Amino acid sequence: MSEWDLAGRVVELVARLGGADAQAEVTVSRGELALTRFANSAIHQNVAESAVEVRLRLHLGGRTATGVGSAVSADGLRALVERVVAATRYTPPDRGWPGLTPPTAMPASARWDAATAEAGPDERAALVRTFVDAAGGLETAGYCRTTYRSVAFANSAGHTAQGRTAEAAMDGIARAGGADGVARHCVDRLADLDGAGLGRHAAAKARAAVDPVELAPGHYPVVLEPAAVADLLQNLAWYGFNGKRYAERQSFAEPGTDQLDPAVTLVDDPLGATGLPFDLEGTPTGALTLVDAGTTLAVAHDRRSAAEQGTTSTGHAAPGSATFGPLPRNLRLVPSGRADAVETVGATTPPSGAVVDADTAALVSRMERGLLVSDLWYTRVLDPKSLVVTGLTRNGLWLVEDGQVTRAVRDLRFTESYPRALAPGGVLEVGRRAVRQPGRFDSVWWEAPSLRLASWNFTGGASG
């Protein structure tokens, strides 16, 4: 039975078992995740997972309950509906219930690649081989993954939707003398992953990071590479442009205010890549400009958070969004700084032996003295309202003098307000080419060029 048929069957069961007043939303997702992991320059694991998930949200008698099941037999679907109907008797009254999405025209599904959806372990292994070989004998580790999802939605109001997505990603490091270099890329088609280019890039960074020097903490101008900028985007999404946090006054976002530098334009754009054309509530998705030339315009909403704010959903309902809030999941920092110039741009491969690509090198060349930062990790939010974050650099940190990378530097701890670092006057330059970085989950990604910032607050060494 197709996902479409399963969703319709559950809606029918709700009407039969819950009564005419029952309001149901059903999402049926058939997903496949395949992962090839490598360490010590050899593949050590191939895993593949294929599963069907039936998610039901039911509003009955003024109360709301949610259930998830994987049994798609007639008995399994009936058991899911009975369980959720019973659960509504024990949940507290839901006075903020926003109602169901009415029948709505859907945008076209994002492009998806059948070859990626059907890729086997041999194809991923071939990419891993090119990464390892290109590292020139350095120890390597990482993964190559492919994902595919087919999703159908139906609700009691008669609204239905369908979509499917496919994605591929590679994330690898190379190690030289205890120093690591990293290269990552997320694409719509497995054929667009350049394993050799990623391997050469990681190896060049690792070799250049050997024998780092100590550097005193302080405020330094920085060039952040795309992998580091991805952490900024992820935290801005979770804590800044989250409609629930905004309603709770726990977000820095103030729509209509010039909060960031005019060089900054942020767009959440699931259909610019492999996203679904609807969210968990059946609301159509599309490009949402959150910041345009420094001016905050919007935050992400699902139906509940939108109703509380007297506005409409932006199509950001997802599992758990009622708890932690609706989030942008496909956030792009636009290279040109203009929302009307959004386009997906592929990664560029640096010349052999180069620490950075030509686009990042151009930003470095215009920095008198500062630091080049490859990656940020172990970032933790200290103050959600001002989005003060602490974390560490990793996978390469270098001193820049007179526009040239001169010495590797030992990793540093930072404590920085991300909105402050991106505030007016803080962004000196935005790179021209964006690179999509894989998120922790499929269909989640962050896309950005390198950034040159006026100041970044380094507060200590990696040990404290």
Image (tube, rainbow, N blue to C red):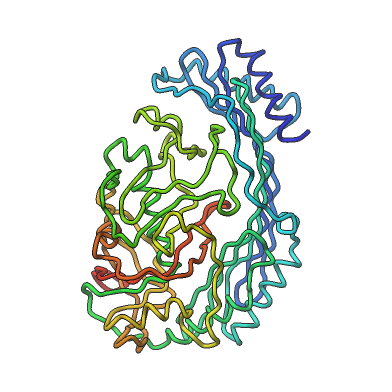
Point 37% across, 77% down: residue: 363
115 w.r.t. 106: above or below: below
Place residue 58 in its image quadrant: top right
* Rendering coords of residue 415 (x, y %): 26, 63
The answer to whether residue 250 is left or right of residue 1 is left
Place residue 300 in its image quadrant: top left
The answer to whether residue 134 is left or right of residue 321 is right
* Rendering coords of residue 449 (x, y %): 44, 67
Point 48% across, 69% down: residue: 433
Quadrant in the picture for the C terminus? bottom left
* Rendering coords of residue 443 (x, y %): 57, 51
State the count of labels. 0
Quadrant in the picture for the N terminus? top right
The answer to whether residue 336 is left or right of residue 130 is left
276 w.r.t. 46: above or below: above
Point 65% across, 67% down: residue: 192
The answer to whether residue 69 is left or right of residue 58 is right
Q: Nearer the viewer, residue 230 or 338?
A: 338
Q: Nearer the viewer, residue 212 or 317?
A: 317
Residue at the farthest front position: 340
* Rendering coords of residue 35 (x, y %): 65, 60
Residue at the farthest right position: 1
